[in-house]
Amino acid sequence: MTSHANSRIPEEPHGHTESTPHHAVPYYKIFILLTILTVVTVAAYFLLAKVGVHNELVRVAVALSIAAVKAGFVALFFMHLKFEGKLIYLIAIVPLILTVLLVSALIPDVIHGHLFNPLPPVEKPAH
């Protein structure tokens, strides 16, 4: 048997911990940016209508593009993804890609109304 007195690792003093590096996140700046982007989204919707773009699909696509930028800022700064390793990006991006694929696959059905009205109305036979 070996003696524990000779192979003992010195302990860290109680109540003392090493601090981990803290990243300064400009929360107020990101909040102001998100607020501005929200105003830009509403303004773009009405501005496109005023310019003559009456296609609802185009206006919604512009609004969703701005919303995607906002979601990116929320994920990067409020969820601290900016300061994480590469694996966390993979964990976040794979479901995002699957979600985009699913929504994109449903767009034709929604546009043509097949999703909400799958069958034509049935006529009753006359007696």
Image: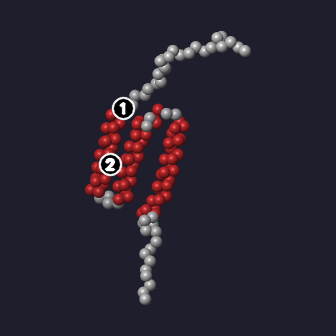
Mark 2 vs mark 1, CA separation in Å: 22 Å
As drawn, which residue projects farthest toward the top?
6
As drawn, which residue projects farthest toward the right?
1
Q: Is residue 59 above or below residue 122?
A: above
Amino acid type indicated by mark 2 = Thr
Judge by depth and name the residue closer to the eye, 102 or 4.
Answer: 4
Q: Which residue is mark 2?
A: 41
Q: Is residue 58 above or below residue 4?
A: below
Q: Is residue 88 above or below residue 113?
A: above
Please say whether residue 104 is visible from this viewpoint: yes
Q: Residue at x 49, y 58 (%)?
A: 105
Q: Residue at x 51, y 47 (%)?
A: 95
Residue 73 picture location, percent across and down: 40, 40
For the residue labelled by badge 1, is the local secondary structure a helix, a strand or a loop?
loop
| Left or right for 91, reference 63 | right
Q: Mark 2 or mark 1: which comes first in sequence?
A: 1
For the residue labelled by badge 2, is the local secondary structure a helix, a strand or a loop?
helix
Judge by depth and name the residue closer to the eye, 51 or 40.
Answer: 40
Please say whether residue 112 is visible from this viewpoint: no
Q: Is residue 102 above or below residue 87?
A: below
Residue 50: image tag: none
Residue 122 picture location, percent across and down: 44, 77
Q: Residue at x 38, y 43 (%)?
A: 70
Q: Which residue is mark 1?
A: 26
Q: Residue at x 50, y 44 (%)?
A: 93
| Left or right for 71, reference 18 | left
Residue 104 picture location, percent across and down: 47, 56
Amino acid type indicated by mark 1 = Pro
Labelled pair 2, 1 in contact (Cβ < 8 Å): no
As drawn, which residue projects farthest toward the bottom?
127
Q: Which quarter of the figure is the N terminus placed in?
A: top right
